[in-house]
Every structure is written in structure tokens, then in C-alpha cells.
Image (cartoon, grey):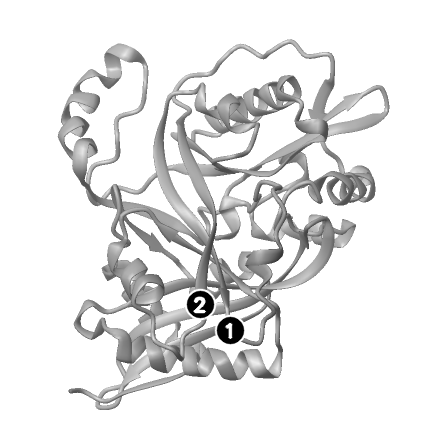
Amino acid sequence: MMHVNVDFAAPADDAAIRRLVKRQPVPGRITVAFEREPDFSLGCAVTGDDCRILVARTGEDAEVVGVACRSVRHVFVNGREQRLGYLGQLRVDERFRGRWLVSRGFALLRQLHDDDPVPAYLTSMIGGNEEATAVLVQKRRKSFPSFHAVADYCTLAIDAHRPKSPLACEACILPANSNELAELADFLRKHGRDRQFFSVWTEKALGNLATLGLRTEDLRIARRGKEIVGVIGLWDQSAYKQTVVRGYSGWLKAAAPLWNSSAGWFGRNALPRPGEKLRSAYAGLICVADDDSAVFRSLLREIYNLANLRGFGYLLVGLDARDPLLPVAQAYAHVFYPSRFYLAEWSDGGHLHEQLDRRPVYVDAATL
């Protein structure tokens, strides 16, 4: 068995990490490669603070054969601000898959945890990735954290092929400007606490999103009179994150040729062929006071038309399966991409998953 070392990534590892994620797609109903050109670390910046990248290197030629990331988020848990870890970007070269390599990775993650403990780590697993579920959940080793399912997550790739008429709404919807960011942060903190794991936003953090592809003018704010009642944004991460379709499985594999042959007739996008990039942007910072479906319907239509205007084929919307706003998004023609959120907890974490109340989860799909 080839010797493998697990350590923190160095800047010189970046090109090798990008090659790894390119050649190791994530299986599921749609097999995709989440590429990170031109800099892997840029894509990690959206996952939280103090992101640490772990890599596994072979002992002989120092080839990178595994990667994972650990960061920390400030989120609402049961309505209160809480530091929470995030684990993501786990990729292992198919030649080295097995519990022994994952065990070494978790040993280093445990060291990070001991130096900077958090109650739990949020992570997601794509539906159909049975190998990851088996290794991490069903047959985990005692040295692993325990993984507890907390939400089924629905990512909808909404076909943005054609513009649609704006929807009438009693609220006034306009692009945001920098003078509104402090007020917007207050709104997000007030109403974001109605969701589990909603990020705790500040004026400064909202302003900094422009460097990561979410410009202030691409936010849409809904107001009744002077009061903010909803917000949504168009988050374009294509400058540092790319989704490449590698294949389809199940009914989608059989349906893809028929879908594409009839796409022109029905005025919709053809599904990307294997090897093609998904030209897409995210609907981000979704927050609506009192879960007002009429306000969300109008906000989503605004951002849908902005996506169409910018030339995106798909608008990606991610919501908890229990979210009362989900049916509004599901009314659009879309491709459904299921996944599941877990809380990973070491034994000294306090069993946060048992303390969660029934609030739906909200995690921006753009931050995964």
C-alpha cells in the first residue's frame, strides 16, 4: 500500500488540488465536477471564516490524492447567534478511497477542533453518493465524528431560458445601493433567525460580497412603505467556481435525449451534455419577512429575469424541503438536485442536533 501523508495545504499545492477536483466528479442523479479555476482557495472563501485546507499527498512523488476544507461560520441556531464549523470540498482520488485515508484526515481535523472547538460541523452529502454515506454515516469508525441528518435540501436548477413578465406585488422591489447595507444587515439578522444556520450578516460582510461575485446592485430589496420585507440576490461565482456535467443516471439519463430534442419547441434550455459547463448563477441571501409567498414570488421573478438578462441558462435556488417558500420556486421549470445536511459532532460537542427546534434550515447554496 502506497504511503500517504495528510497535512495542511501550501500555496504550491493549488494546481494539484484543482486537477484533483477536476478528475474526481461527485456522483448522483447528475454526476458533476465542481471545478475551481483559477484558484481553489477562492472558492473556499465563501464557506466561512478561517478556512483551512487539508490535503493528502503520496509519499513518493507528493501527488495530491485527497482534499477537504474546514471553516467556521457565525449562524443562528434556535434563534441565537452561534459559531458553527463547516466541512466541505471532500474529494479523494478513486485509487485511494477507503476508511484508512479518511481516518487520517479526521485525525488532523480533530487537532484543529481541539485548538478551536465548535459545537458541531455542518456538512452536506449529495443524494446518490452512497459511498460517502456508507463511509461517513452508516459504517463510520469510532474515531470519526458522528453524523446526524438535520435537513433534506432541494437545489433547483431553474431554466432561465426566456424572460417572464414581472409580477404585481404590493411591495416595491428595487435594486439595493450601498447606503442600504446597514439597514439590510439589520433585516437579515431580525428575520434570518427564523431559520436554522442562517448566516449572521453585518454591513461590512455584505459589502465584502462584491469581491466574491455578489454585487450590491445585484441585490433586490422589497419594501412596504419604508420597511424592508424581503431580499434576494443574484450571485455569480463563475469567476472562481465552475460546475461541469459529467453524466446522468436513472430516469434522467433516459430522458435527457428526449428533453434536448424537444427543448427548442418548448422554449427551454437543453440539458448540458457531458463535458459542458453549467452556465448558472445562484439566488442568494433569500430572506422574506413572515414567509410571505407573494413577496418571495415577486422577488424570485425579479432575480430570474436578471439571470436571463445576464445570459445565465440556469438560476440555482437551494431551500430546505420543509421551507414554506419552496413551492414558489418549484413552480418554475427546473431540474431537481437533492442532498442532505448533517451535523458532524465529536463526543464532546454537546449533541447539538438533539437541541434543534423545528425551524427550517437555510444555507445559501452558493456557500457550499
Q: Looking at the picture, how far across and down is residue 149, in whole percent?
A: 45, 53
Question: How far separated are the C-alphas under marks 1 and 2?
Answer: 6 Å
Q: Amino acid at mark 1?
A: Trp
Where residue 276 sits, quadrant-wise, is: top left
Which residue lies at the image location 55% right of the left edge and 78% below the top edge? 113
Q: Nearer the viewer, residue 215 or 262?
A: 262
Q: Nearer the viewer, residue 190 or 246?
A: 190
Q: Residues within 10 Å of mark 1 (few under 14, many from 20)?
A: many
Q: Looking at the picture, how far across and down is residue 28, in whole percent?
A: 26, 46
Quarter the N terminus occupies: bottom left
Q: Looking at the picture, how far across and down is residue 346, in whole percent?
A: 51, 73
Asked if one can make out residue 64 in the rendered structure from this viewpoint, the answer is: no
Which residue lies at the image location 59% right of the left edge and 61% below the top edge? 352
Q: Nearer the viewer, residue 182 or 349?
A: 349
Disc 1 target residue: 346
Pointers 1 and 2 in contact (CB under 8 A)? Answer: yes
SS type, badge 1: loop
Left or right, 232 with reference to 88: right
Which residue lies at the image location 42% right of the left edge and 38% below the top edge? 155
Q: Looking at the picture, how far across and down is residue 363, in whole percent?
A: 55, 47
Q: Residues within 10 Å of mark 2 (few under 14, many from 20)?
A: some
- 194 over 331 or under it: above or below: below
Asked if one can make out residue 306 in the rendered structure from this viewpoint, the answer is: yes
Q: Amino acid at mark 2?
A: Ser
Furthest-front residue in this view: 354
Counting residues from the start of the chain, the first of labels 1 and 2 encountered is 2
Disc 2 target residue: 146
SS type, badge 2: strand
